[in-house]
Amino acid sequence: MKGKQVIRTAAVLGMLAVGIGAFGAHGLKEILAETGRAETFETGVKYHFYHSLAIFLIGILALIKPEWKKLNTAAILMVVGILIFSGSLYALSLTGISWLGAITPLGGVAFIAGWALVFVAASKN
């Protein structure tokens, strides 16, 4: 992905984070209370939104520093992190299927790897 594509991806993910968060707070309030997973759902939304912003900033940085090739992979890893980390928390919250919590850390690893690649990209001459 190029810088502009990364920014567009971040914009879509940001819109989804706001929409999912609002739907969770209003449309899913009873279901989340029933499953006792409102806080879990909220954690998914928070990480979704934080990393949407991070992807947006990576896109801007990629426009400024196109020679920092690792930024592309960093953005992809953060998208994967959102899909696995937040996605598994959303699904866990709505279904109560507890084994979904076992895959959540894989999304966390993708987030960490994405941040590590931002560090590596910024460390290159």
Image (spheres, rainbow, N blue to C red):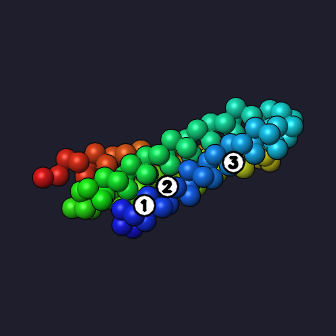
Query: Which quadrant of the structure image shows residue 30?
Result: top right
Mark 3 or mark 2, earlier in chain: 2
User: What residue is at 24 percent from the left and 57 percent from the top?
Assistant: 65
Q: Which residue bears the numbered disc 1?
A: 6
The amino acid pointed to by label 2 is Ala
Tell me if mark 1 has few (under 14), some (14-19) or many (20+) residues whose alpha carbon lies within 10 angstroms of its own: many
The reply to whether the C-beta atoms of the residues labelled 2 and 1 are less than 8 Å apart is: yes
- Residues 42 and 104: in front is 42
Tell me if mark 2 has few (under 14), some (14-19) or many (20+) residues whose alpha carbon lies within 10 angstroms of its own: many
Tell me if mark 3 has few (under 14), some (14-19) or many (20+) residues whose alpha carbon lies within 10 angstroms of its own: many
- Residues 101 and 45: in front is 45
Q: Secondary structure at mark 3?
A: helix
The amino acid pointed to by label 1 is Val
54 left or right, relative to 16:
left
The amino acid pointed to by label 3 is Ile
Image location of residue 14, percent across then percent down: 56, 50
CA distance separating discs 3 and 1: 21 Å
8 left or right, relative to 3:
right
Image location of residue 58, percent across then percent down: 37, 52
The quadrant of the picture occupied by the N terminus is bottom left
Q: Secondary structure at mark 1?
A: helix
Residue 20 is labelled as 3
Q: Which residue bears the numbered disc 2?
A: 10
Image location of residue 38, percent across then percent down: 74, 34
Residue 113 versus residue 63 in the image, above or below: above
Mark 3 or mark 1, earlier in chain: 1
Residue 84 versus residue 49 in the image, above or below: below
Q: Secondary structure at mark 2?
A: helix
CA distance separating discs 2 and 1: 6 Å
Q: How many marks?
A: 3
User: What residue is at 57 percent from the left and 46 percent from the top?
Assistant: 48
